[in-house]
Image (tube, coloured by chain):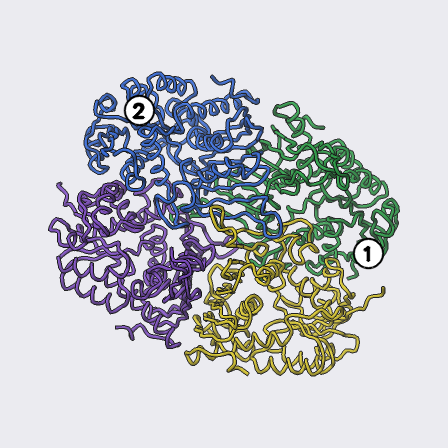
Chain colours: A purple, B blue, C green, D yellow
Amino acid sequence: MSKKTLRIGLIGSGYMGKAHAIAFRSAPAVFELSADIELAMLADISAEQAAAKAAVMGFKRSTGDWRELVNDPDIDVVDICSPNWLHKEMALAAIAAGKHVYSEKPLALNAADARMMTEAAERAGVKTLVGFNYAKNPTVSLAREIIRSGELGDIVHFRGTHNEDYLCDPEAPFSWRLKREFSGSGTLGDMGSHIINMAQYLVGDITDVVADLKTVHKKRPIANAPGEFGEVENDDQVHLLARFANGAQGTLESSRIACGRKNSLWFEVTGTLGTLIYDQERLSELQFYSRKDAGPREGFRRILVGPEHPDYANFCVSAGHGLGYNDQKVVEVRDLVEGLCAERPMWPQFRHAYEVNRVLDAVELSHQERRWVSIEEIA
Amino acid sequence: MSKKTLRIGLIGSGYMGKAHAIAFRSAPAVFELSADIELAMLADISAEQAAAKAAVMGFKRSTGDWRELVNDPDIDVVDICSPNWLHKEMALAAIAAGKHVYSEKPLALNAADARMMTEAAERAGVKTLVGFNYAKNPTVSLAREIIRSGELGDIVHFRGTHNEDYLCDPEAPFSWRLKREFSGSGTLGDMGSHIINMAQYLVGDITDVVADLKTVHKKRPIANAPGEFGEVENDDQVHLLARFANGAQGTLESSRIACGRKNSLWFEVTGTLGTLIYDQERLSELQFYSRKDAGPREGFRRILVGPEHPDYANFCVSAGHGLGYNDQKVVEVRDLVEGLCAERPMWPQFRHAYEVNRVLDAVELSHQERRWVSIEEIA
Amino acid sequence: MSKKTLRIGLIGSGYMGKAHAIAFRSAPAVFELSADIELAMLADISAEQAAAKAAVMGFKRSTGDWRELVNDPDIDVVDICSPNWLHKEMALAAIAAGKHVYSEKPLALNAADARMMTEAAERAGVKTLVGFNYAKNPTVSLAREIIRSGELGDIVHFRGTHNEDYLCDPEAPFSWRLKREFSGSGTLGDMGSHIINMAQYLVGDITDVVADLKTVHKKRPIANAPGEFGEVENDDQVHLLARFANGAQGTLESSRIACGRKNSLWFEVTGTLGTLIYDQERLSELQFYSRKDAGPREGFRRILVGPEHPDYANFCVSAGHGLGYNDQKVVEVRDLVEGLCAERPMWPQFRHAYEVNRVLDAVELSHQERRWVSIEEIA
Amino acid sequence: MSKKTLRIGLIGSGYMGKAHAIAFRSAPAVFELSADIELAMLADISAEQAAAKAAVMGFKRSTGDWRELVNDPDIDVVDICSPNWLHKEMALAAIAAGKHVYSEKPLALNAADARMMTEAAERAGVKTLVGFNYAKNPTVSLAREIIRSGELGDIVHFRGTHNEDYLCDPEAPFSWRLKREFSGSGTLGDMGSHIINMAQYLVGDITDVVADLKTVHKKRPIANAPGEFGEVENDDQVHLLARFANGAQGTLESSRIACGRKNSLWFEVTGTLGTLIYDQERLSELQFYSRKDAGPREGFRRILVGPEHPDYANFCVSAGHGLGYNDQKVVEVRDLVEGLCAERPMWPQFRHAYEVNRVLDAVELSHQERRWVSIEEIA
């Protein structure tokens, strides 16, 4: 009768922090969750900013010191929406404090860190979830359901991209994302991690890769410092061939300079019996070809996601009405709450995110050494 | 410093009631609203159902008697999400109690009722908003902005549809929506009202119509009563030619038996300088052709809605990430709150919804008398 | 063994004349025709132009006087590709000379003329074919096959447009097409005749119409005469509601000022069991929704025309390789040859084109009198 | 005044032979060619078949012995449309006889053969053209024009596929295409050669590749021999990373088992200033994004090919009317005739096709040795 309450401590009020807050607020009305959610505390860069944002976002308390949040006894879940290079320190501190951790992706700047974080969480017995939110879209869940059901037969091919153009302008200013110290790799870790996670989710483990990366724009102007330039230390575009454990082959790409592409997380999965095509820029539809339709009426079916598909009916009872970017986070929050309360297995946990980080490291190694790299080579 | 609090009383927890609740919960985190929102009371068909739904949706109190909600002194806004035939009685009661009213569409079963409701609200000095939510989509706001700016020149043509297939199966059971007493017209009032409102929003007043309606499936089985059928009293599909005050012409259609169409609120607006095309099934994109591009590089531009367009940046800072059906309601709630608190003019008020009802009545009269009807003929 | 030879006399070497010549040349290699085709004579505006064009197009003889061609004993078929106002005189002369007639559309400037031409041909016992070429596209033949087979159930709705933008620029110069004397109606007869023919072909006879026309740009500059303007005497855009003999309803539109639309002959046909959508700008694909697919894998199928569909295999043995505008004329030429030689019934003959002209006249009458008009009213 | 006549000798009347014949017949009416074309002789597998097909296709003479055709003094151009493994012997014989050679692709089963053929032709001073017909589509010519003009800036990325599903059914019967002796590689040489040629045409020389191939269906039933299977000796799918001489990177793929893909020759070319996207299944449109449009009206422009673009006006004077597969061959024939008569440089000659064969060999070597291969390694 009386539900448990999950007390959330969120670190970071930027792009993803706001998306998390919106999701925490709407999830209980979308889904009938097994626990109540309390927006307990927000940590931000300063006490002032944290207080101001907490008021807007609906958090009860706030702090300018994330360690205070992590160690607060009235916090159950630490939600990390800080820049990438801080994930490790914050997650380890939260784990040490016995908190469950919900972290944005990529989990870490490299596989070794991700492994350390994973092992720490597993030793401590806390639960973890990583925000690969695109895999939470009901349309993508439908894709996975079709694949799992065998409707595509044996999967033989995956082609995926995650391309945007946020740095296509060479005059776009220098930032922390362009330095290895703070961001690790470039588009590879930022968007490439999404398409790698998606490939693993839909097709299974990647076992080998060969990759080619490039920093197209090697210098970028420093904002408010006329005539000064920062040196870009990581990749603008990445291309790789992958082999999967089940024998499938694939090509994956990511670019942050793909002029005109705004959120082109795009994939085509081909099996011996059919094919699926998905485009995140039209996130509520899935193209499905089945060899069962072979003959004069065959063709890709444009499926509009609806109440007969996973999770959708909780948002809307009419088909084809369309879900949005933030709705993916609502599903993710549902997975968090149900994973913590109803013992439903969570995915992707730190361990799954570590598998993404292993591929990221293998890709960079392959590029440096110009050779095929087995994921086994990455500890 | 200390914000006003708007106390919401919601009647109805079905399809639209849930959508409103989700929007009330997330709107404050999406927009920085001028008032706090309190989900004060939910009224539903029985005290039990109201209590259960209130717990899930986050309402403080609940009641099985909507009149109690309407007359509660601690309610500022009555939000009517009940079936259509109840809008009138509830709205008049709320107005009599001095409440602001936020009502789902269509406002009333006919123009006379809509006029009475409009005049009552205006006399009482309460504010009103009607849930024509498709007009709140940032992509549609962009369309209006382009039209208003003159980028299309003089508007000469509008073609719009709102087609679904929820009754395409002749075996779909009989319901209240098929009886004039409870629903008024059929697809005309249900979805036709949306496309008429959209045409008025984008092109301006409709002055004359000629229409043709049809009830294709004249009987439908009564659920759980084998062998019994209900007589369908209203239209399955409607087609009309319209003339606009500014000289433009157009065709409008609606169907609830359009096999395969899930939410085909679709329009094309043509001016002397360009054209816009919109499809609600791909609600985050707008096709834009400008004669300024004329020549060998011309073509419709596929604009993905983003932070440079109205309202979008509040949801997401990256372009092309896609908004969903429920996000439209979030914008609508923002309009409600700002209209009540910041004295921003609200649209569409009861009076604007009355103008929709006038066209609906003119359409039915035109069909009955097989002639052009001036909207002026409808009081 | 020894095939008959059809000797073609073509009048006009412009846009359509050239398309006919290309088709006559390639048709025998595409289809195994029942007769050989001889490009016997070309008539054009002057002897010089006729001779020059005949050399390029491959005609044996040429003339500057079309009456010479019509009366030449070594011509079997007179192919009329002249401007619209000349169709009548030329066709009547050809019929009087006992020739079969292949004419471009619209057959005549009004129904009375079309009827006279039809009756003359029928009395003379010559065969006729009219160039409504869009209906010859294998993709459209597939649409008709699906409708005829009953796969859509009873047809309840047709929505069709034929929109282009060739006159969207108000500075586009005055021409014969804009004068009633030479062109009759405007976009109505030019492109509207195509979409009306298509509706009749796919759905059946139109029985009643109500229409609204408009001349948006009332004056246009006269080429090479600075400061002089011609008065536009016919419609820039036309909209109509139609009722069909089988009970279906529909909306049809045509515009020559639809900015950005290049060949938007577009239709959606809805039945009780399914829907087809076609767009001439993507002329090798057909969207097909069948209620047989209803359920979680339903969606419009994008059928790419291929060898399992009508006529396609003659062009290419691989599916999805795409046919073009001129290929439609090749099918039309096949229909001409087989109709003349193999006694295969020809469609559309003058009589079918007369039925188009009747609707065109009804549309104009409806607009003038602002009322529904029965096609029966047009003799 | 009196034009030269080119006397064509065609070998093979199958899929491509027919396409060539159609093109030879219509090209003179589409373009005003510098020479007349005479369909002089057809060679086929037997004298009987050759005679029958010659009658249909319009060839004056025929033979069951291709050597007779090659050595006939009244033949100017030998057009080779035979299966791949015969190209070499036929081309060398034609060159030895002093004929110009027009050959289907791939030119040869390996680079060494292609080189020998190239050198023989160059020594003999005969002209050559190879049928990479997709590059002749006006839409693709437009893409090249845009790239050449600098409108995309520096090209940084190419992604291309050529996927079909003609062997997606594991029960599709065994054929010569599946044996190395007759076909060389599998989808790599068949369709992969098209996308490699396209990449070279649009972006420039490929310098390095790393590739991964797979034969998914290793045995296929032998037609009319129940229970017997042939062993598939070449690739069903191929994936490769490429580096270009100008610094661009890319991924290329080909598959003959891509369920649902009918002619998915698809590419995206990204530069520092813009992007082009092309899909052969919609061969008359090109998506074009330019950073010049950056801002709130930006988006990919859907350009419909028309008379302002290369070659199109010869087919049709109205934009957006759509060209088809066979029209590409008509442009190719124009290039042949003008190359031979008007000394316009021909492309792609044997030497260009040899460059394709080099990449094909490098791809296979890379796969075998699991390493990056420089094209320089292939003689």
Q: Give coordinates of residue D279: x percent, y percent.
A: 53, 58
Q: What amino acid type should be assigned to the residue bearing mark 1?
A: Phe
Q: Give coordinates of residue B17: x percent, y percent.
A: 30, 33
Q: Is residue A202 left or right of residue A29?
A: right
Where residue C158 sits, quadrant-wise, is top right
- Label 2: which residue? B100
Task: In the rendered view, tell whether residue B119 sits above or below residue D207.
Answer: above
Residues packed near mark 1 inside 10 Å, few (<14), some (14 to 19) or many (20 plus): many
At 54% from the left and 41% from the top, the residue drawn is C268
The numbered mark at residue D174 is none
Residues packed near mark 2 inside 10 Å, few (<14), some (14 to 19) or many (20 plus): many
Which residue in the rendered view is the most extreme toward the front?
Answer: A226
Q: Is label 1 or label 2 in front?
A: 2
Whether the residues at callouts 1 and 2 have beta carbons within 8 Å, the answer is no
Q: Is residue B322 left or right of residue B275?
A: left
- Label 1: which residue? C59
Q: Give coordinates of residue D40: x percent, y percent.
A: 77, 70
Q: What amino acid type should be assigned to the residue bearing mark 2?
A: His
The chain that hosts pointer 2 is B
Q: Give coordinates of residue A38: x percent, y percent.
A: 18, 44
Q: Depth check: B370 or A108 in front?
A: A108
Structural distance between the alpha carbons of marks 1 and 2: 80 Å
At 51% from the left and 45% from the top, the residue drawn is B287
